Amino acid sequence: MQRIASLAPTDPMPRPGAHVVEGGVRFRVPTHASDVSVVLVAPDGTRRIRALPRVRDGLHEAVVPGIGAGTRYLLRIGDRELPDPFARSLPEGPRGAAEVLAPLAPRAPRRPLDMAGAPVIYELHVGTFTREGTFAAAREKLPHLAALGVDAIELMPVASFPGARGWGYDGVALLAPHAAYGAPEELVRFVDEAHRLGLSVLLDVVLNHFGPDANWLPAIDPSLFDEDEPTPWGAAPRFAHPAMRALAREVLRLYVVEYGFDGLRLDATHAIVDRTGTHVIAELAQIARGLPGPPVLIAEDERRDPMLFDRLHLDGTWADDFHHAVHVLLTGERDGYYAPYEPTLSTLADVLRAGWRGPARSDRERFVYCLENHDQTGNRAMGDRFWSLAREEDARAATLLMLFAPSSVLLFQGQEWGTRVPFLYFTDHEPELGAKVSEGRRSEFAQFPAFRDPASRARIPDPQDEQTFLRAKVDWSERERAPHDAILALHRAALSLRKSDPVLRDARAEWQVARHGEMLIVTRASRGQRRVLAWNLGHEPRDLPAGRVLLASRGDAVQERRIAPRCAAILEG
């Protein structure tokens, strides 16, 4: 324990892993083990072992001459050979030899994402966004997103994990893109093409835990994790350890400077444990502000605490209260985390006034609203999409409200045409772990009334079954069929209005929310101009406020200054 206690977060730790230098490759392994080597694996399978001497307490390092990019290697700690968890390329996955990656040309963010402008972000999962499930195939769909009118793309985690398929939140090698998606160079091409089309690109990264399988970091050094700080996924990463802290810094540097990402979405920041004087998130935020752009950092955090902005200096946070309030209002569901939300217009109005269920803030552009995201769909037993759960006219009206709000907005793949294709939870773990995951997946829904019966739980798709993964693939042909073509047209029109209208462009416009019976009236005002959203959730037509109708949720929603039931309209007041 004495050695662990001596690890201060200010201890300098150079970038771990393998890096091409003049005349060879420098290998760095942060470990307190005494016997450390690198095993060079030639294409014909022959192996050469080179010792990595200790250069300081907790770090072994050496330059191996005469080799370069493309070299395959393993680490040897004592008599055990391991893949390098700090590798930047793992072509065989996290159980195979690593590859030395040539330095990527530094590329400053070309289209900095301005959270003050309340951007629209499009979340996608590389493996299911296309039939091929690769960076290259996703790149071919970028013109669709540019034409749709979003500002940024957010990739779900791409860090290497074992198996061919998964959501990515069980990554174990944070610096190496998942091999099934394509080589690192293909990720570079994806980002470059997005920038060429005027789209920013964000990456979802997971620092709060590592996956349960093929995580070699404890074998490198057990003190990288803190057994006294349990998380739902195991022992917490120890950010007082200089190597773990260096890894977090390298995640930011690598993906922003070398890959060109315009920011990161930090998964479950409430579960990132750091009891040092400067929280690792605050340190990353400080580094980000010194980079060209600068890149943005967006949290996923359940605490609803202003310290996310005031002390950790994050640029934004997912704000699920909007989703939950709309969801219970339109579906009536009250199970699980929906229980605290009353299915009333008053509940939704309260969330809209404050921005979330925390202390009210005026900088609502920092809140990222959604009607769907990977969690809200994939954590359902059947992966139901919003447009499958709500009535179409209600979903149309809710879409107008979300895109009218002065918050940032997130759309999830296929949402723009109202896809009914489920986004299911899928995995590809080794058999023993996979069986536990499959059983656990069904057991966790036993508390829900719809799945208390074992027969009903048996219908929940098995995450280990490849068909579960294949069923989650986006069906791009839906766009061309009714009613999806009309839903896509509505999204394009609403996004265009959000960008072109001078009041809706002003995220700091005056914001008022009122409920009149079954009518929600939301007003935005800026520089002497007003825009009004009226949503009739009743079952009878209602009179509209005065003003010219700019956009309605349905073509026949407004007739003779009255709005039809279950419809919404945006007016120039």
Image (tube, rainbow, N blue to C red):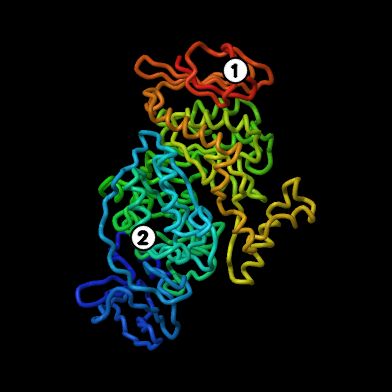
Could you tell me which secondary element the residue under label 1 belongs to?
A: strand
Residue 157: x and y, percent? 46, 56
Residue at the far front: name it.
Answer: 480
The label on residue 563 is 1
The label on residue 245 is 2
Residue 251 quadrant: bottom left
Total numbered labels placed on residues in the image:
2
Could you tell me which secondary element the residue under label 2 belongs to?
A: helix
Residue 418 quadrant: top right
Is 116 or 218 nearer to us in this picture?
116
Q: Residue at x 65, y 63 (%)?
A: 465
Residue 468 quadrant: bottom right
- Horizontal side of residue 182 vs 451, given as left or right: left
Q: Which amino acid type corresponds to the residue marked 2 in the rendered image?
A: Arg
Is 480 or 349 nearer to us in this picture?
480
- State the quadrant of the C terminus: top left
